[in-house]
Image (cartoon, helix red, strand yellow):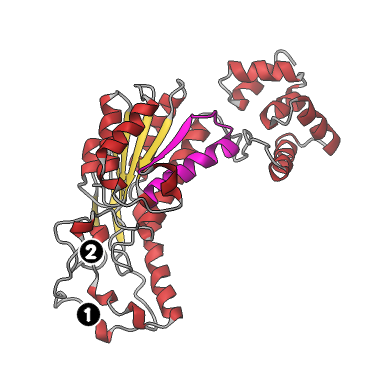
Amino acid sequence: MDSDLPPDAEPDATEPDPTEPDPTEADTTEPDLTAGATTTTDATRTGATTGTTASRVTGGAPDGPTTEVVRPEWSDIDRLTTLDLVRLMNAEDRTVAEAVAGQLEPIAAAADAIAARMSRGGRLIYAGAGTAGRLGVLDASECPPTFNTAPGQVVGLIAGGSAALVDAVEGAEDRPDLALADLDALAPTAADCLVGVSASGRTPYTVAAVRQARAAGALTVGLACTRGSALVAAAELGIEVETGPEVLAGSTRLKAGTAQKLVLNLLSTTVMVRLGKTYGNLMIDVRAGNAKLRDRAHRIVALATGADEDTVRSALAATRGEAKDAVLVVLAGVDAPTAGRLLAASGGRLREALESARPEA
């Protein structure tokens, strides 16, 4: 299900604004690259969003989120040639990165706050429904192999549970009680962080999850693709990436979903860099659980140390495939147990471990 709206709240079409171009006269050979583009800035406070819209938004749901607005100039997309249709969609997709760029300050603030709590043993929890929930689960599931996060350190919650990952669980997003049950099972504390993700910013499951986590003392972040949402109002920190109307009205798996994926990429990657899960731009904490990742670990150690193949292979064998430990073995000239001890003392930060190893080497 693409829309965050409940079934009884579908947008109603309205008469086109006379200032808008007649959709029957639209040029279908070169779609307007700026149509629907939004830019946002947040220079004063986290969660406050200001912005301008490149072209006026008309039609759709005047009292609802902009993600549900129907653009009358796009009413004939089913009559476009296939090439012109994908050109139009691609042109709209180009506006997403600009919208995300307008929220870099609150994204950075959220990343720093999340990293601070996780460095003290806290968890990162994502909560959402439909596309937003699936993207949160996706990001959480990719953290263990990429950053060697501990089991349960990054968690994704989706309305309707694991079944909702592959099938739409109708009505789950409208049930705050499901969110309360999911949060009760995790028992969040003041050490944890919860990021609620919703295109409309009003999904009952997601808003309830944020409120419950905040009541437990957890840091809460609301990520919405519209301004002035209940989700951001409920959260301690807000990220409002206003992506505007979708080419396919209300299908928030499109621009809104792309924006959410970009923001989650920024959040989790920045947090892991701050936690010392990388060395430069190398995935030094990669979990080498298959042949591809074992090859990657070998390349990472070789790049980080400049050592020959035999030395790299020997170091990885001694550290049971742990690339970070292997780099310490090669560069600091220590054995594998000492490398493990140095990394534990530095909180897993390789640069600090290398500095502390020099007097011992």
Residue in view at x 34 percent, y 55 percent: 99
Residues in magenta?
131-159
Q: Name the residue at 68% across, 17% down.
A: 357
Which residue is located at x 78 percent, y 25 percent? 318
The image quarter in which residue 236 lies: top left
Near-viewer residue (216 or 177): 177
Q: Which amino acid, mark 2?
A: Val
The residue identified by callout 2 is 69
Quarter that holds the N terminus: bottom left
Q: Is residue 63 left or right of residue 322?
A: left
Question: Which label belongs to residue 250?
Answer: none
Amino acid type of disc 1? Pro
Residue at which label 1 appears: 21
Position of 119 with respect to 314 (left or right) is: left
Percent x, y of residue 234: 23, 36
Using the rendered image of the protein, determine whether residue 140 is visible from the camera's viewpoint: yes
Q: Is residue 192 above or below residue 83?
A: above
Quick check: 343 left or right of 221?
A: right
Picture quadrant of residue 38: bottom left
Spot occupied by residue 225 in the image (x, y as percentages of width and height): 30, 52
At which x and y percent is residue 11? Answer: 20, 63
Left or right of residue 54: residue 354: right
Helix, strand or loop at mark 1: loop
Q: Is residue 222 magenta?
A: no
Sequence-earlier tag: 1 or 2? 1
